[in-house]
Amino acid sequence: MAGMCYNKYMYKPNFKITPKINNWIAQIEAMKKKFELSRILPEQEIVLRYRAAIESINSSTSIEGNPLNKKQVESALAGKMNSWEKKVIEVVNYKKAWDWIEKRNKKKSKILFKDTMKLHSLVADNLLSEDKTGLIRSSNIYIVDGRGHVNYMGPKSSQVKKLIDELLIWLEVNKNNLHSVLIAGILHYEFVSIHPFSDGNGRTTRLLVKVFLNLINYDFRGCLVLDSYYWQNLSAYYGAISHAKTYKDQSKADMTDWLMYFTEGFYKETKELERKVDILNLSRKTGNLKLSDDEIQILDYVKQFGKIDLKETLDILQIPERTCQRRLSVLVNKKILKMVEKSKNTYYILKNYKL
């Protein structure tokens, strides 16, 4: 199945909708309805959105080689790290782009070419020279591996604007004819294949997908993070999206495998969000309506692995040992966690509550 035809543009993605894709989309839809019906307090939703922003910034910049972890990302955004360092500028820029999306989409206007340039200008600010920031690359682009072999050659720079315009027209025409998850996957595939900029293409592409999902209210109220899925297995991400060595062949290739990867990842991240919502619902069951971000992270870990000890808490929170001990004690006092002592080992489990 290919995208619907439209006589003013040439872009036509090549893909098939497989039974697996349909199954994942059905499960995503079910999860979306469950999320919309969940009784999340406004302050809890703010926590979820904040954590989503940190996770997205950390994952998306890490994909491009940024060494900061989540705690360091938070410190950088709080102005506690050297603002002139490249790694700090990258995460601060990404947060500015994330915030811009929220403001931009209040207008509910369709995505335009200028939006793609604006995203890049935010991502590349103080990282690239002015003649490369928020502007289409002036020359052809080649992606090479460590041995100098060309892995991919993008379209000629003179073709880039036309290709982006065609993609955005296709998106607008097909947004009501194709499921939103598939539209987002195709947008991701084609935009990064066009490779419009001298640098920052991956980050701009992932942010553009967020613009689209946020615009159509399919980003689970700003709490969904797709970037984590890519970052967990980079070779799978690049392997799924790379179909040819030239744009000409890449744009015509069957992208079904990519859409299967993308849809499965979308499903897995909605399941991850469901688990986080379950953690917040636990606070309501126990009568403790407010949980701190640190407490949520601890319970999130227990939810995944069944128990937690002090060393694991230190690894997760990256704060002093005495503070970690206090966080665990508070959750015991709230009767959410139970302390278990076995020989010389002390660990914590959930106390009489099923998530």
Image (spheres, helix red, strand yellow):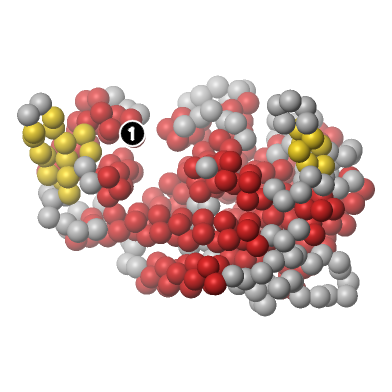
- Of all residues, the one furthest to the right in this rendering is 158
In percent of the image, x 57 and y 46: which residue is there?
Answer: 236
Q: Which residue is mark 1?
A: 317
In percent of the image, x 74 and y 71: which residue is there?
Answer: 2
Q: Residue 122 appears at what percent x and percent y?
A: 68, 42
Answer yes or no: is residue 26 visible.
yes
Image quadrant assignment for residue 209: bottom right
On the rendered structure, is 157 left or right of 100?
A: right
In percent of the image, x 74 and y 56: which residue is there?
Answer: 190
Q: Secondary structure at mark 1?
A: helix
Answer yes or no: is residue 180 visible.
no
Q: Residue 65 appears at what percent x and percent y?
A: 60, 31
* Residue neighbourhood size for the residue with mark 1, other residues' Cα within 10 Å, grouped as few (<14), some (14–19), many (≥20): some
On the rendered structure, is 227 left or right of 209?
A: left
Q: Residue 211 appears at what percent x and percent y?
A: 63, 57
On the rendered structure, is 255 left or right of 74?
A: right
